[in-house]
Image (cartoon, rainbow, N blue to C red):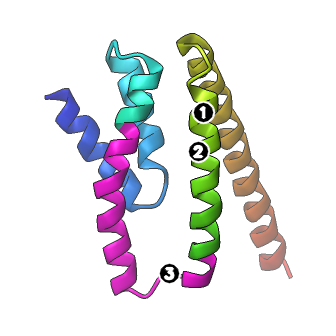
Amino acid sequence: MKEILFGFISGIVAALGMGGGTILILLLGLFTNLKQHLIQGTNLIFFIPTSIVAIFMNVKNKNIDYKLSLIIIISGIIGAIVGSKISFKIENNQLKKYFGIFLLFIAFFEIYSFFKQYRLEKKENNK
């Protein structure tokens, strides 16, 4: 039952473009006994159908820059190959730790971006 809830929550977050896979990894890491490699592999499979639905909806709404997408796809495939080879050489506990550090960097960046935007809007409103 909890897996259905995890999938539902992650699907909503993925559809919003906010990293449903990151939420899925967090939920599986906190509430299951799965190893980090298995969690991340499960996340990759989760990503396929959810991204197909998101792609369909964004194509329908004309929200895709195809030239930019092609560049990102090609470099992403190369990055995925390199990243997979690296992850297979990292122990489970280390991989979990690195993922946590990665999430902290994202969190700090998002908080910084929020306050930067807030100050900019406040400055524009005071003019």
Q: Which residue is mark 1?
A: 85
Q: Main secondary structure of the magenta part?
A: helix
Q: Is residue 126 left or right of residue 32?
A: right
Residue type (three-letter) at the residue carrying disc 1:
Lys
Decide: marks 2, 1 in contact (CB < 8 A)?
yes
Q: Which residue is mark 2?
A: 81
Label 3 to label 1: alpha-carbon separation: 30 Å
Mark whose residue sits in front, 2 or 3: 2
Q: Which residue is mark 3?
A: 64
User: Neighbour class for label 2 at 10 Å: few (<14), some, many (≥20)?
Assistant: few
Q: Residue 7 or 47: which is nearer the viewer?
A: 47
Q: Residue 92 or 11: which is nearer the viewer?
A: 92
Decide: marks 3, 1 in contact (CB < 8 A)?
no
Q: Is residue 6 left or right of residue 124?
A: left
Q: Residue at x 65, y 24 (%)?
A: 98
Residue type (three-letter) at the residue carrying disc 2:
Ile
Q: Is residue 112 left or right of residue 42?
A: right
Q: Residue at x 28, y 56 (%)?
A: 49
Residue type (three-letter) at the residue carrying disc 3:
Ile
Magenta residue span: 43-68
Q: Can you tell which mark lies on residue 1?
A: none
Work out whether mark 2 precedes mark 3 in sequence or the reverse, and give the earlier one: 3
Q: Residue at x 58, y 13 (%)?
A: 91
Label 2 to label 1: alpha-carbon separation: 6 Å
User: Neighbour class for label 1 at 10 Å: few (<14), some, many (≥20)?
Assistant: few
Element type at mark 1: helix
Does the stretch in magenta take in 67? yes
Element type at mark 3: loop
- Please state the horizontal and vertical placement of residue 67, each as a whole percent of the image: 61, 83
Mark whose residue sits in front, 3 or 1: 1
Q: Residue at x 35, y 34 (%)?
A: 42
- Please state the horizontal and vertical placement of residue 53, each as a whole percent of the image: 29, 66
